[in-house]
Image (cartoon, rainbow, N blue to C red):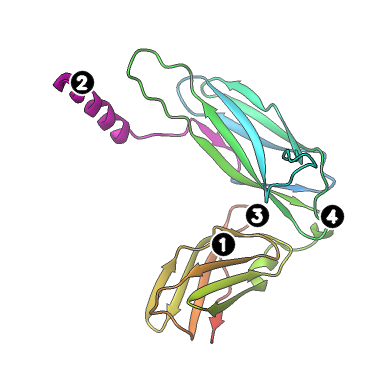
Amino acid sequence: MSMVARSGIVAVLMWVFASPTHAAFVLGSTRIVFNEGDRDVSLVVTNTSSVAYAGQVWLDPLPVGTKDGGAPLSFFAVTPPLFRLESGKEQLLRFFRAEGTLPEEKESVFWLNVQEIPPQAKGKNVVQFAQRIRIKLFYRPESLQDADSREAARKLTATFKGGRLSLSNSSPFSISFLEVVVRKGEQEWQLKSPVMILPGDVGSVSLPSAITPPFQVRYRYISDYGGHHDGPALEVTR
């Protein structure tokens, strides 16, 4: 390979890794709650870039449900699933219940994906970045609509076994963590915590060998409205 070709490749790589990337789309909310009985819910997408972008929208259930043939269930429909958005303009997305039966005793969680599709690049040796924004959509059955989603934090329990910390969510709501910290005496360890624990599920994380009971677990979680809250301290004695 010639020195010129090598220099060109190095220059492109330096440009790719040095150039900052910014999302063109900004969403009007950090999460969506869809209550059973709602006709639809909406979300505003704004194009903050200086050029027009296209967008694609879809939802992934957690965990993924399937039809008899193995195809993913479309629990929700979104309109429009594809759109073009001029610079500085807004697009209203609307979500409707579609097919499939969802649990009546606990909430269900979906990933909402908004994929940017940039315009065709002009010129040669131009690298483009298309970002995908993901937020959660929570489906609440009628049985939970008078309940308090903060119940998940109040019902969270912690246990220790075999060098692992387990966090159990016995509530019908999911809990999304910002951080989990273990405190033993004057020392603290910030853990790589589970991002979210679904209703009735358990999240587990390995602890450093220096951490053995008794110790205290403190954590911060995200509320329905995107607020950050401290959960009650959990004492692990054995």
Amino acid type, label 4: Glu
Which residue has dot 3 on it? 224
- Residue in the picture at 51% in, 72% down: 218
Residue to which mark 1 is pinned: 221
Q: Quadrant of the N terminus?
A: top left
Whether pointer 1 and pointer 2 mark residues with C-beta atoms closer than 8 Å, the reply is: no
Name the image quarter holding residue 55: top right
- Please tell me in which quadrant of the rendered image residue 194 appears: bottom right
Which residue is the site of mark 2?
5
Q: Earlier in the sequence, mark 3 or mark 2?
A: 2
Q: Is residue 147 left or right of residue 90?
A: right
Q: Work out whether mark 4 precedes mark 2 in sequence or the reverse, and give the earlier one.
A: 2
Indicate left or right for 83 with 125 as reference.
right
* Residue pictured at 67% horizontal, 30% vertical: 92
User: Which label is found at residue 17?
Assistant: none
Residue kind at label 1, given as amino acid type: Tyr
Element marked by disc 2: helix
